[in-house]
């Protein structure tokens, strides 16, 4: 069996990459309404109509707020409507 030796710098680089991947997996991927509607194959108007049953956040002030949807959970939530 061959033995592989890595340097401290290599180990640090690997650890940093693992942390980066973990962050990407735990942070939601937020997409605007137009892209969310495209993912689900529905119109933006229909998406806005059912938005309260989907994972989203509002970004901005009241009437001008943008709706951002969690792309990773969108399909699953839509299937359960």
Image: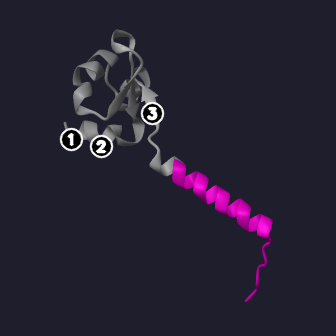
Image coordinates for residue 17, horizontal then vertical, percent: 65, 56
Q: In the shown orientation, is residue 23 left or right of residue 4?
A: left
The residue tagged 1 is 80
- Closer to the chain start, of discs 3 and 2, is 3
Which percent across, then down, holds residue 18?
60, 59
**Main SS of the magenta segment?**
helix
Sequence-first tag of 3 and 1? 3
Q: Secondary structure at mark 1?
A: loop
Q: Give the label on residue 30, or none.
A: 3
Q: CA distance from mark 3 to mark 1?
A: 20 Å
Q: Work out which residue is located at the far top of the displayed protein and give it.
A: 63
In magenta segment, residue 12: yes
| Residue at 79% across, 64% down | 9
Q: Residue at x 77, y 65 (%)?
A: 10
Q: CA distance from mark 2 to mark 1?
A: 6 Å
**x, y (%) of residue 38?**
40, 26
Magenta part of the chain: 1-23
């Amino acid at each position: 069996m061959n033995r592989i030796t890595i340097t401290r710098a290599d180990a640090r680089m690997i650890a940093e990459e693992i942390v980066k991947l973990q962050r990407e997996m735990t942070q939601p991927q937020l997409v605007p309404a137009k892209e969310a509607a495209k993912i689900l194959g529905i119109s933006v108007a229909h998406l806005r109509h059912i938005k309260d049953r989907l994972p989203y956040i509002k970004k901005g002030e009241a009437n001008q707020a943008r709706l951002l949807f969690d792309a990773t959970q969108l399909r699953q939530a839509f299937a359960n409507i």
